Image: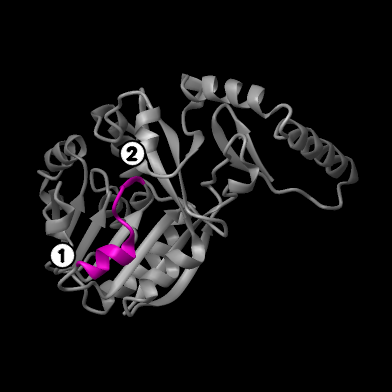
Amino acid sequence: MVEQRGGRIFVIWIDPEDEALMAYLSASQVVRQILEGPATRPALLRWRRQQFFSEAGFGSYFGLFDNFAEARDWLPASPEFDHAALAAEYVNVRTKQVFAYDYPVMWWLERAFRDGCTQVLDIGGSVGVHFYAYRRYFEMPQGLCWRVVEVPALVAIGRDMARQPDAGALRFTEDMAQALSGNDIWLAAGSLNYVEDARPGDLLQRCEVRPRHVLLNKLPLHDGEDYVTTQNLGAGCFAPTHVYNRRHFIEAIEAQGYTLRDQWQVPERSIYLPGFPERCVPTFSGLYFTI
C-alpha cells in the first residue's frame, strides 16, 4: 500500500490474511475514491495545493502539465536545485552511507570497473555522493576519472570537498553537453527526470563516443502517458519533473543499440498525485543497459 503522511510517501507491506486490516483498507480506498471523484475533487485539490506550498508539503508532488515551461509558469520563482541549502543532506548523509536502492547500481558498477572501465559520468551526482559512499564497499580502479555534472551551487560545494587528498578522481562541471562523450559509464540516479531536455535516448544520439554501460536509478516510470508534474524540494524550492512511459523510455535507449540487462524496483520512491489517481507511480525503477 502507498500512503502519504506529512508530504512524504511510504510503501507499507500488508498481510492479506489480516481480515480486519483488509476491511479497513477497503473502506479507506472507498473514501479515497469518493474524495478523488468529480464532486469533491475541486475541494481536495484546493487543500492539497495549499499543503504543497507549505513546509508540510516537502517531498510531495502536485499538478499535471504538458511541459516544463507550463509547470514553471505555475510555480513561484525558485532556484530549483541550484540552492546551497539543499546540499546539507547530501554532504552529511548521502556521502557516508548507501541505501537499498544503491545496491543494484553498486553491483553493476563494480563489474564494469573489473572490465577495465575508468571513466564515469555521474549526471546529477550532487557533491559526489556516489563516489564517496560507494568506495567504502569496493576498490575504485587506478586512473579513475569520476565527472559530476551539476548545478552551479552544488558544483562549488563539490569542488571544495574534493580538495581532500583521497578525492582526486572527482571532477565537476556545469556543462553536460561538453561532458557527454568519452565516458565508459553513465550514471544518473534520480536526476534526469528533473532536466527538461535530458532523455537518455536523445543524449546518446548526440554523443560522439557512447558509454558502454548506462546505469539509471530512481526513475519515475509507469505504464501511462508521459506527463510533467512539480515537486516541493524543501527550503522554498520547487521544480518540474518528468514522469515517463516505461515502454517508450526503454525502447528509445534500445534504439541506440543498447540492451536492457537488468531492472529493479525502488519502493522508497513513489508519486501520489492529488486529483489524478490514474497518474500515480507506486514505485520508481532502476535500469541497466550495455552496448
Tell me where residue 241 sits by quadrant: top left
Query: In the image, is 31 to the left or to the right of 262?
Result: right
Specify start and end residues of the magenta stretch as a single range: 194-206
* Helix, strand or loop status at disc 1: loop
* Helix, strand or loop status at disc 2: helix
Residue 239 seen anywhere in this rendered image of the structure: no
Q: Residues within 10 Å of mark 1 (few under 14, many from 20)?
A: some
Q: Amino acid at mark 2?
A: Ala
State the residue in front, 246 or 169. 246
In whole angstroms, how far apart are the C-alphas of marks 2 and 1?
38 Å
From what the image shows, is residue 236 above or below residue 61? above
Q: Amino acid at mark 1?
A: Leu
Q: Which mark is residue 69?
A: 2
Q: Residue at x 84, y 44 (%)?
A: 22
**Image position, residue 130 (x, y; %):** 30, 53
In the image, which is nearer the foreground, mark 2 or mark 1? 2
**Image position, residue 278 (x, y; %):** 64, 47
Tell me where residue 183 sits by quadrant: bottom left
Q: Which residue is mark 1?
A: 144
From what the image shows, is residue 198 above or below residue 34? below
Query: In the image, is 76 to the left or to the right of 167?
Result: right
Q: Is residue 201 magenta?
A: yes
**Image position, residue 261 (x, y; %):** 43, 76
**Image position, residue 215 (x, y; %):** 35, 65
Q: Residue at x 79, y 50 (%)?
A: 15
Q: Residue at x 11, y 58 (%)?
A: 178
Q: Is residue 228 magenta?
A: no
Label 2 or label 1, whichever comes before in sequence order: 2
Which quadrant does the C terminus fall into? bottom left
Q: Which mark is residue 280?
A: none
